[in-house]
Amino acid sequence: MSKNNYFSSSVGKKQLMGITGLALCGFLFAHVSGNFLLFVGAKEYNMYSHALISNPFLVLAELGLVLFILIHMVQAFVLTRMNKEARPVKYAIKAKGEKATSLVSTYMWQQGVIILVFIALHLWTFKYGEVIYAEYDGVQVRDLFGLVVQVFQSPIYLAGYLLALLVLGLHLSHGFQSTFKTMGFNHPKYEPKLKLMGHSFAAYVALGFMVQPVYIYLFH
Amino acid sequence: MSENSKNMTIHLKLWKQDGPKSKGAFVSHTVKDVSPDMSFLELIDVVNSEFIKKDKRPVEFDHDCREGICGTCSMVINGEAHGPQKATTTCQLHMRSFCDGDTITVEPFRAKTFRVVRDLVVDRSSFDRIIQKGGFVSVNTGNAQDANNIPISKPDSDRSFSAAACIGCGACVAACKNASASLFVAAKITHLSLLPQGQLEHRQRALNMVDQMDKEGFGACTNTGACSLACPKEISLDSIALMNREYLKSSVKER
């Protein structure tokens, strides 16, 4: 009997994609929650970011994130190609009635591409962006709060940012709950709760990230 | 009694393709005096008799029982596998689901693995090859056992039975944006793995059936749920989760 290879199977690939996606959800949760310090004040926000940047273990966490994103991306690429190849001739008409599915779940990879471009732009603007310094109690730290204020003066940038976050929210609203099904967790008792949890999580991350630049744009 | 008792005029756009390698195209045809009580396949029968009278080659399509249980009829009607009505096979779809003057587009089930044989007939033998890999149980031959000799819990038997309702029509593949056969394979795995009789092949079943599904060239599952909506037997998406669980567990435990 031929040896089955988990990682080359469609189910294995999907599970790898789901698990890495879920791990990235953990990052998003921490990221959006920490960033709420923006509402507390410039000092708190900058000290928080300083604590993160100066932590020697941050590199490890970053490498982990890069690895997860890479796996998620590669699997998405391989699976999307496989899925496209599985239907070489398209239908002339798309389902519209009761048998039509949500657009969010149908366009996952397109959302992924938008999110990827967004991440690149986001890192370029902030992590590798202009370095301004602030000093608190004799400690010189990066004034990321100042950078945020500076960046979000542009309404065009703000609009693009919000749009990307909306896409991220939609991506999560399907991805989060879908991962559980992909991993094999499914129970009629927990299914509605899981769906609610997925939507709530997506809303928390997307809206949480959205209110921050809007607040900066309006009040700073 | 139908809601709409007047006979209708229906404009059809039917897919015609001479063979697997020929290029297909839509053929337009208008049918007058269509009874709303006619089944969709009967409408195609009428079209074909008109074609034959005009010395045109009839449109080929698969059909057998015309009772909604064999899974042979396979058409995508206006972009929907088996047409607009849920929990229905094409043969059980009636013209009262449409309106007078409607234009209806009829295409074959489209997937790389479902090669078009001719017109609306597709080759679904890939499903047979998947079944051969694990869609069976080893049984004792000889006399049937006494009833209730093998205890099965009611919820398990219900779930298994719901999955066993799969008629292997392929609508799940036709409806899926990835042409994935996950719902079909999952229905078979769910049907057998919940029963004591299915335990002997339990470990290899998910591994081998998924392996064959991939080899045939079906796509992967994105959990959009299109398959379940198109399924004439309303097989639940839960079964796909069960298949994924079986696959993961078997991959870990299989020596």
Image: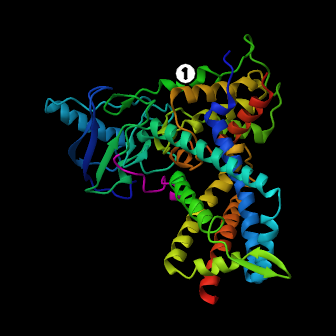
Q: Position of residue B125 (x, y in %)?
A: 48, 23
Q: Position of residue B38 (x, y in %)?
A: 34, 44
Tell me which chain the residue with mark 1 is part of.
B
Residue A183 in the image: above or below residue B73: below
Answer yes or no: is residue A193 visible: no
| Residue plotted at (60% across, 65% down) | A122
Q: Main secondary structure of the magenta part?
A: loop
Answer yes or no: is residue B16 visible: yes
* Amino acid type at mark 1: Arg
Q: Which residues are magenta?
A: A92-105
User: Residue at the top extreme?
Assistant: B142
Left/right of residue B135 with respect to residue B196 in the rendered view: left
Whether residue B183 is in magenta: the answer is no
Q: Position of residue A161 (x, y in %)?
A: 56, 71
Instruction: Indicate the quadrant where residue B27 lies.
Output: top left
| Near-viewer residue (A127 or B79) | A127
Can you identify the residue that label 1 sits on? B129
| Near-viewer residue (A75 or A87) | A75
User: Residue at the left extreme?
Assistant: B54
